[in-house]
């Protein structure tokens, strides 16, 4: 049985001190939970302090992005080598905001996925369609393309450490969430693709999350779906009480 995953993507919010205060309040409430994998993804500036704050707890630390080269003259970028040395366990790759605002291509996302694996960092690989694509009825075609190109050249041993997040672009930060049935259907499609392209065992074991205006009010309905293994959460993960409530709900599934 797959363990639920609750991953917080803080985007460009929280100073270093605010991040540390969050951890002080959340760790005592959640560190004893064994039924859920909790991941916090703060800004790059907070990572070093949070590595120390989360040491000897069950809560994992993730970065929000990475560059695909180990090192070099890439001003402003952060490599998987640097993140691995720091002690980061996860990294978000291919988030729609990276694709949309910064023009990341499927090929670049693929480079980042493979770079993360090469330094033993687990990628949270994000895919999802736009509202226009959904209305055109091509959601599954878009998802299939993102899977094929984003995971090109990834072998089965690496894929076993993959986390996939289905995030319909039109639901991110809008307050509008996909229906439970829509989310379940697309995530089932993703799992079948993994079954066909990697192995039944990997498809059975890897977590596939939903993201897009997830909050304490809709999380339980999502988790009740057999195919949905948790959530990648933006705005609702910024408040301690809200986050603790969602982690508690996932731990009880």
Image (cartoon, rainbow, N blue to C red):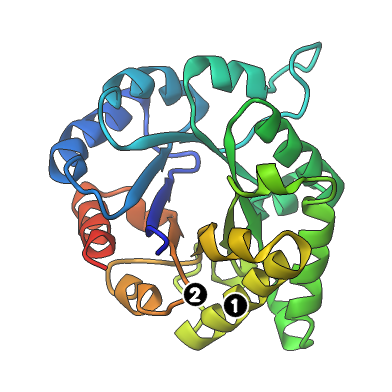
| Mark drawn on residue 188 | 1
Residue 160 spot, x, y in % from top left: 61, 49
Q: Quadrant of residue 142?
A: bottom right
Tell whether 253 sits left or right of 87: left
Q: Quadrant of residue 16?
A: top left
Q: Nearer the viewer, residue 159 or 214?
A: 159
Q: Residue furthest left?
A: 28
Q: At x 66% / y 70%, what residue is drawn?
A: 190
Residue 195 spot, x, y in % from top left: 69, 68
Q: Nearer the viewer, residue 14 or 92?
A: 92
Q: Is residue 62 above or below residue 69?
A: below
| Mark drawn on residue 227 | 2
Q: Is residue 202 above or below residue 62?
A: below
Q: Are marks 2 and 1 in contact (CB under 8 Å)?
A: yes
Q: At x 73% / y 59%, what residue is drawn?
A: 198
Quarter holding the N terminus is bottom left
Quarter holding the C terminus is bottom left
Q: Is residue 171 above or below residue 33?
A: below
Q: At x 42% / y 50%, what residue is drawn?
A: 7
Residue 78 appears in the rendering: no
Of the numbered discs 2 and 1, the one sitting upstream in the chain is 1
Q: How many other residues sit within 10 Å of disc 1, few (<14), some (14-19) or many (≥20)?
A: some
């Amino acid at each position: 049985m797959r363990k639920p995953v609750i991953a917080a993507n803080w985007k460009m919010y929280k100073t270093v001190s605010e991040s540390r205060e969050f951890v002080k309040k959340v760790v005592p409430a959640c560190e004893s939970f064994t039924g859920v994998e909790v991941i916090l993804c703060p800004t790059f500036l907070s990572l070093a302090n949070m590595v120390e704050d989360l040491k000897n707890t069950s809560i994992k630390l993730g970065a929000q992005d990475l560059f695909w080269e180990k090192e070099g003259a890439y001003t402003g970028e952060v490599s998987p080598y640097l993140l691995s040395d720091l002690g980061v366990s996860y990294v978000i790759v291919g988030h729609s905001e990276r694709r949309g605002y910064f023009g990341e291509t499927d090929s670049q996302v693929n480079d980042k996925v493979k770079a993360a694996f090469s330094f033993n960092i687990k990628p949270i690989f994000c895919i999802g369609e736009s509202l226009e694509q959904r209305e055109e009825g091509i959601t599954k075609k878009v998802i299939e393309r993102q899977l094929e190109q984003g995971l090109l050249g990834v072998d089965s041993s690496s894929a076993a450490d993959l986390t996939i997040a289905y995030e319909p672009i039109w639901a991110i930060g809008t307050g509008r969430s996909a229906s439970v049935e829509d989310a379940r259907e697309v995530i089932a499609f993703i799992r079948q693709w993994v079954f066909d392209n990697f192995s039944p065992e990997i498809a059975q074991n890897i977590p596939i999350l939903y993201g897009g205006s997830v909050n304490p009010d809709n999380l339980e309905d999502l988790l009740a779906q057999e195919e949905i293994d948790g959530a990648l959460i933006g705005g609702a993960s910024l408040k301690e009480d809200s986050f603790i409530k969602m982690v508690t709900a996932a731990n009880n599934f």
